[in-house]
Amino acid sequence: MLPAYRGDGKMTRGKSPEKAFVEAETIASRRGEVRLIPGRRGDSFDLIIFEGLRTIFVKVKRSLTKFTWPREVLHQYQREIAHVHRIPLTAVTAREFWVRHPSRKWQFFLVRHDSIVEIGAGGIYAPHAENPAIIREPPKGNIPTSGDTGFTSESDK
């Protein structure tokens, strides 16, 4: 990627994410009332979402790669996330970091006091958990009656 230059000959940090802001406003409007915050790239947030019980401050960025782990986004955007982290976190506020990829896919991250976690577009955190294994009752018939088979039946209870 070639460096971008301002009119005065100095380099910039790339194109402004205009399309990302338009898409972000659409996504955010599904959650509540939205206010875009015009400003500079170094600002702590780009938009505010007013939900029924909380206010969310959101920073929007673009990325060329999808992040597998929240630690990767923290490494890639350390300075930007540090700016978001400056916003006081209370019982009625939240801080989020949204990333748009060239494929128009989005990733959303919740910036907490001591960590960053990936969330859905609706702001819901769904932890990665193992589903419980469902084991059917063994078939009747040639099952040894001595020893533990690992299965329980209603009569064993």
Image (cartoon, helix red, strand yellow):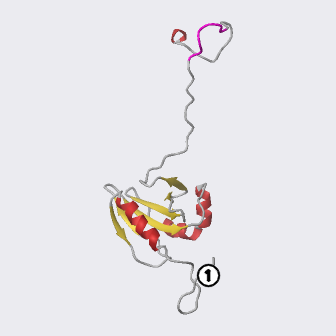
Q: Kindly indicate the quadrant of the structure image that contains residue 71.
A: bottom right
Magenta segment, prevailing SS (helix, strand or loop): loop
On the image, the x and y values in percent for residue 95 come to: 45, 61
Q: Residue at x 43, y 54 (%)?
A: 123
The residue carrying pointer 1 sits among few (fewer than 14), some (14 to 19) or many (20 or more) residues within 10 Å by Cα, namely few
137 lies above or below 39: above
Quarter of the figure with the N terminus:
bottom right
Q: Residue furthest bottom?
A: 8
Which residue position holds label 1?
A: 3
**Left or right for 97, reference 47:** right
Q: Is 132 covered by the magenta stretch?
A: no
Residue 71 at least partly seen: yes
On the image, the x and y values in percent for residue 9 come to: 58, 91
Q: Residue at x 45, y 71 (%)?
A: 19
On the image, the x and y values in percent for residue 150 come to: 63, 18
Q: Kindly indicate the quadrant of the structure image that contains residue 153.
A: top right
145 lies above or below 121: above
Front-lying residue, 60 or 79: 60
In the rendered structure, which amino acid carries the disc numbered 1?
Pro
Highlighted magenta segment, given as a residue range: 137-143
